[in-house]
Amino acid sequence: MISAEKIPNNVNLSSNKRLQRALEHWQPKYIQWWRDMGPQGFQDYHQVYVRTAISVDPKGWAHFEYVKLPEYRWGIFLADPIHDRRIGFGDFFGQPVWHEVPGEFRNQLRRLIVTQGDTEPASVEQQRWLGQRCPSLYDLRNLFQVNVEEGRHLWAMVYLLHSYFGRDGRDEAEELLERQSGNRDKPRILEAFNEPIDNWLDFFMFTMFTDRDGKSQLMSLSESSLDPLSRTTKFMLTEEAHHMFVGETGISRILERTCQLMKQSGFSEDVRKIGGIDIPTIQKHLNQWFSLSLDLHGGEVSSNAASYFANGLKGRAKEDTFDDDHVLKEASYRMEFFEEGRPVTKEVLMRNAMNEVLRDWYVGDCAAGVERWNKILEHHGISDRLRLPDRKFNRNIGMYSGFHFDPNGVPLSDEQWEKRKFEWLPSPADSEYLLSIMAEPVYEPGKFANYIAPPRRGINQLPINFEYVRTES
Ligand SMILES: [Fe+2]
Ligand SMILES: [Fe+2]
């Protein structure tokens, strides 16, 4: 039974019996989904030291305790309301924000919420076997922290569907538990969320690049005129930051260890011989997850994106940092097109280029992260550098899909691509190697797998050798 006490919330759930009943009806299905499709082998006999949000103030959402995963207190939290908040962009600029869903935008809003909501359980499904191959208890805890919070993000979207979309919303909430990542008949909506994540290099790249797409989408939704959507996504962003921390520092620690192993072997590139992950392999996985995550931003020229912006449903990330023009009726955007084998720059209406505007923000945010990684290589006196591939590389959505490019953006024929693609993307042999060094999980407190360095510090100021996941005897 859900009660206001059992389900932490700041939406006064107990005062809305109808909504409370609807969520009570959905909750057991959610728990069943979590057991079936969540972390495999860690449901009943393990206690995990996780952060549980119990309110939105900084103290409340940094509350740590040991819990069994199915008993995690998935709550519903909205960021505090802003008094007299006004619509910040589009055709209704300056008008008061909405506290109910306007009938004419109901379908579009539902679509946006469902698409966002679908990614949350999908990533839990993708990652469900990783616990059995973890490099340390510290990392195992981080994985589960990310997983329970993605579960909470699903709750956040389901709350909106149940509260504002009536019968349709309830149906959508059910379907969010029915689609499955990688399932042929009922796949998740977006492609990157149907790719398996069965090794930890993929997990860290996913949390670095795909959770960062989550950040850009949530930032643009947090600008929304629909106030509850804005406040929900704003609070989700505070949790998202930790997911990207896990990804960025995970790769940093792999790089750190790779550098150590390279030195040990007399600056040999071939660290696989001593169980490390070589830089070219790291680069291939970067290429894969960056390009998949670029696709998540949608087509370059998009009338849907234009309409979302015009109607005030989905804005630009940090709309108020753009000067003056928040309506963008006439504004244009210089975009590169690919015509007859060469790039041509053209002006398009800014509103139609909204996906690309958000992608620009995203690429900049990723590039800064890659710079930080390169500092580690530099620090160790190693001349290799990681880099983001060109935006045209390995795209399956938008104007570059159907063509092939190398990571420098040079066009390739189908034959050239087929011949060379595994120079730039993980090959079956690479995956096999990664699985071979991850076959034995490391469950001893303070111990780390050979291919990754320990973190600088533990979680919540605890030591690195703290027992972050306890096994019941
Ligand atoms: Fe999320
Ligand atoms: Fe996330």
Image (cartoon, rainbow, N blue to C red):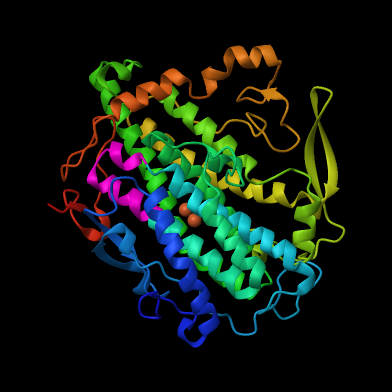
The residue located at (71%, 31%) in the rendering is 401
* In this picture, residue 238 sits left or right of residue 261: right
Secondary structure mainly formed by the magenta segment? helix
Which one is in front, 332 or 50? 50
Q: Inspect this view and state whether residue 323 appears.
A: no
- Report which quarter residue 160 is drawn in: bottom right
- Residue 369 versus residue 177 in the image, above or below: above
Q: Position of residue 216 (x, y in %)?
A: 58, 54
Which region of the structure is painted magenta?
129-147
- Give the residue drawn at x 39%, y 74%: 7
The residue closer to the viewer here, 65 or 399, is: 65
- The residue at 38%/72% (across/down) is 58
Q: Residue furthest left?
A: 473
Residue 368 is covered by the magenta coloring: no
Q: Quadrant of residue 3?
A: bottom left
Q: Is residue 398 left or right of residue 200?
A: right
Q: Is residue 150 above or below residue 14?
A: above
Please tell me which residue is depicted at 12% across the width and 52% down the height of the picture: 473
